[in-house]
């Protein structure tokens, strides 16, 4: 954390990985070695990336080649080009400089997950915060029980990192369930919504933790279904997204009821957000 | 009861001089475009005198020459807020070096000290809330320096407006803390009560007369009556659960039919903290400044996330504002975000009154039928 909480640190693009036509992973390194060694983060946390003269946006931290357990000296950010800032960010080439502020927010509850079965349930395209977490679970495999990855997409093409899922599916004690609303000819998984897959989960309610990420109606439906299947609301965690300008609880844009998503989240325990999740206008 | 020293009105200039000698820029109430605002005061003669006011929903009017007093009115559109949280300011600037690297510089914070004459109890309560918000574990450096540079001379209200309801929120009209000096106005002058150590120091240098006990009792009674005379009130201090239990109340739609979504209420509110940030490039392209400016939950961009505006409709924006201000503030800061100043009532172009909306919406508290 910088002394002046608004001031970015300079970072350099070390590598640029084109994941799909609109999704790019930027591998960044803070240029100040001291700052680099002071930078501790965990999956689910995010940085504010500042593109010179254009603006600042929140982007989740996907660990670099190392695990989050080692120090994350390289910071991967997987960015989908959707608007003004992200479209310009994905064009950055190795050597380019940008600003980084962070890490911010509360990440996934990896401590609570230790020794438990972990169910990662995601929807929508390129759910970077969840994917980074699965990577992390796999890197620290021995610390957790069974792992399941449940991912739903609209079109089959929306699934990025398809080989990654195929690879995870072959790991011991790992269950991968995929669903596409609109499958293509090569789709050999479930057709329909992600919630339709939850009944197929090998679920031991007394030693499970669920982590959800994706569109809010999907998260709400999944959480409620998991509760019907025997999970306590406290065993469910989810990652929220709101407009963010400051990332430190000052600008007010990310408020969700009484919560500041930037500092009280983005990962919340379900009971904290259950009251308002899915209520239009919050 | 200890009787504070008395400063005859014609000695107000001495107070100003002491402040100026200590290096303070003095601001106090002056009339600008028909409204009372805080503006620079170089001489005590420049302080507004003789004004009273009427405030009602959507209505604010000053009347000159109707009293000998200087503070026989309640408040103007402006609170203390712009003095600590500037409407627009630079946070930092970035410079691109010839080799493509970037240098970031924080904005300067060498603000001059400011003494404010005529601060009201509601505005002090709002300042406390802004401190809770901006001086948390990620303290805002600009707010912090500005706050430290303030010397606050409060006045106890004797003439609340029809729109004031600080007595019901517990924030006024008497001033008891968080300022440096607190004044009680009488027809001929002021009782000067020192609240902070800095205030005590300054009071020692003033030509104070021995205060008359009977006169002071009357001055205090005026303030008590000012609280009792208020006609508006909140149905309860904590409406969090009442409001969140009524998210589908038909009244939200009704109020949205009148609300212009202009955000005036949030601009005049002394506790609203929302702001947005933008990057402003210099003409030569080698520097950009990162600025923040006040924003409002009534603006379309406030709830925007790529491709969707979460609060498209006025109904949702008004509900966000009211449930936050009177509801979820309790979750965030342990109390309501409203200090009862009534500005949002007077400065709403269509005269929407949140106390009236709350009365209708929070039926469990008010006990009224829908
Ligand atoms: C905690 C968090 C983590 C995120 N992680 C990722 C990630 O790993 N990868 C990724 O591709 N995207 C991520 N996003 C979404 C990403 O921040 C937005 O896509 C991005 O802000 C859009 O900016 P833009 O200028 O390109 O779009 P525009 O549509 O032009 O948006 C204009 C401005 O609105 C604000 N804004 C718009 N959408 C969002 C949004 N979804 N969230 C917050 N502010 C927004 C920003 O200030 C933005 O500059 C994350 C969002 C949050 C809140
Ligand atoms: S909500 Fe209205 S009455 Fe309450 S503090 Fe804000 S402006 Fe004043
Ligand atoms: S709300 Fe209370 S303290 Fe504020 S101006 Fe009105 S009477 Fe004075
Ligand atoms: S992003 Fe500014 S308050 Fe959360």
Image: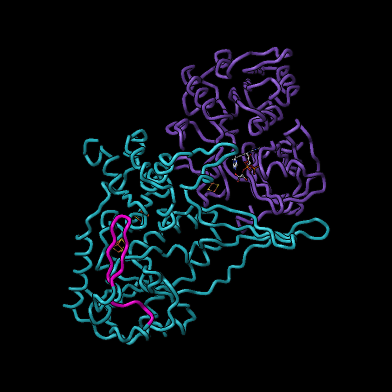
Chain colours: A purple, B cyan
**Image point (23%, 61%), residue name:** B227
Check the image and report above or below for B259 versus B45. above
Q: Position of residue B279 (x, y in %)?
A: 64, 55
Task: Report whether A108 appears left or right of A165.
Answer: left
Task: Report whether B240 appears left or right of A42.
Answer: left
Kindly tell me whether residue A179 is visible in this rendering: no
Q: Quadrant of residue B222?
A: bottom left
Q: Position of residue A128 (x, y in %)?
A: 66, 33
Quadrant holding the N terminus of chain B: bottom left
In depth, the one of B152 and A216 nearer the eye is A216
Q: Position of residue B32 (x, y in %)?
A: 40, 71
Task: Report whether B214 appears left or right of B292.
Answer: left
Check the image and report above or below for A151 versus A190. below
Kindly tell me whether residue B267 is visible in this rendering: yes
In depth, the one of B296 and A252 nearer the eye is B296
Q: Quadrant of residue B62?
A: bottom left
Identify the magenta region: B46-63
In depth, the one of B308 and B142 nearer the eye is B308
Q: Would you say residue B157 sits in the magenta stretch?
A: no
Quadrant holding the C terminus of chain B: top left
């Amino acid at each position: 954390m910088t002394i002046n909480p608004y001031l970015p640190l300079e970072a350099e693009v070390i590598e640029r990985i084109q994941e799909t036509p609109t999704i790019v992973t930027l591998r960044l390194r803070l240029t100040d070695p001291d700052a680099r060694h002071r930078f501790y983060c965990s999956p689910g946390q995010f940085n504010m990336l500042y593109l010179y003269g254009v603006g600042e946006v929140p982007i989740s931290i996907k660990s670099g080649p190392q695990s989050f357990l080692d120090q994350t000296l390289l910071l991967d950010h997987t960015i989908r080009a959707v608007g003004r800032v992200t479209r310009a960010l994905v064009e950055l080439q190795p050597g380019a400089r940008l600003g980084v502020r962070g890490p911010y927010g509360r990440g996934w509850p990896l401590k609570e997950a230790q020794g438990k079965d972990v169910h990662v349930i995601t929807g929508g395209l390129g759910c970077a915060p969840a994917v980074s977490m699965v990577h992390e679970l796999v890197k620290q495999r021995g610390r957790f029980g069974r792992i399941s990855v449940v991912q739903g997409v609209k079109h089959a093409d929306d699934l990025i990192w398809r080989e990654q899922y195929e690879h995870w599916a072959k790991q011991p004690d790992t269950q991968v369930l995929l669903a596409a609303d609109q499958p293509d000819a090569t789709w050999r998984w479930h057709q329909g919504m992600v919630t339709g897959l939850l009944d197929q989960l090998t679920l031991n309610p007394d030693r499970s933790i669920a982590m959800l990420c994706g569109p809010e109606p999907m998260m709400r439906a999944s959480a409620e279904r998991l509760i019907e299947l025997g999970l306590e609301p406290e065993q469910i965690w989810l990652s929220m997204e709101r407009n963010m300008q400051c990332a430190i609880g000052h600008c007010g844009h990310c408020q969700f009821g009484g919560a500041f998503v930037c500092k009280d989240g983005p990962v919340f325990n379900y009971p904290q957000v259950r009251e308002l999740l899915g209520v239009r206008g919050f | 009861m200890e009787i504070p020293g008395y400063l005859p009105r014609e000695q107000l200039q001495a107070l100003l001089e002491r402040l100026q000698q200590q290096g303070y820029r003095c601001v106090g109430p002056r009339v600008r475009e028909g409204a009372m605002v805080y503006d620079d005061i170089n001489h005590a003669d420049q302080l507004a005198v003789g004004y009273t006011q009427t405030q009602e929903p959507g209505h604010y009017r000053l009347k000159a020459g109707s009293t000998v007093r200087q503070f026989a009115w309640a408040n103007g559109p402006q609170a203390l807020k712009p003095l600590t949280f500037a409407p627009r300011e630079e946070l930092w600037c970035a410079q691109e070096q010839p080799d493509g690297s970037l240098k970031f510089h924080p904005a300067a914070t060498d603000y001059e000290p400011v003494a404010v004459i005529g601060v009201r109890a509601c505005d002090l309560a709002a300042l406390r809330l802004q401190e809770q918000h901006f001086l948390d574990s990620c303290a805002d450096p600009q707010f912090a320096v500005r706050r430290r540079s303030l010397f606050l001379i409060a006045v106890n209200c004797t003439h609340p407006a029809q729109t004031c309801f600080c007595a019901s929120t517990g924030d006024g009209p008497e001033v008891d803390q968080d300022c440096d000096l607190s004044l009680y106005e009488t027809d001929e002058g002021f009782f000067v009560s020192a609240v902070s150590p800095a205030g005590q120091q300054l009071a020692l240098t003033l030509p104070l007369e021995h205060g008359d006990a009977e006169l002071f009792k009357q001055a205090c009674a005026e303030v008590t009556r000012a609280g009792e005379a208020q006609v508006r009130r909140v149905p309860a201090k904590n409406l969090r659960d009442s409001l969140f239990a009524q998210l589908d109340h038909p009244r939200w739609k009704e109020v949205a039919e009148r609300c212009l979504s202009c955000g005036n209420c949030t601009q005049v509110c002394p506790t609203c903290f929302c702001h947005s940030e933008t990057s402003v490039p210099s003409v030569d392209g080698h520097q950009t400044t990162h600025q923040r400016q006040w924003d409002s939950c009534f603006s379309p961009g406030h709830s925007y996330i790529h491709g969707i505006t979460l609060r498209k409709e006025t109904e949702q924006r008004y509900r966000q504002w009211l449930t936050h201000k009177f509801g979820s503030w309790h979750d965030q800061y342990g109390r309501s975000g409203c200090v009862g100043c009534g500005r949002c009532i007077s400065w709403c172009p269509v005269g929407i009154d949140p106390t009236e909306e709350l009365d209708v919406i929070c039926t469990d508290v008010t006990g009224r039928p829908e």
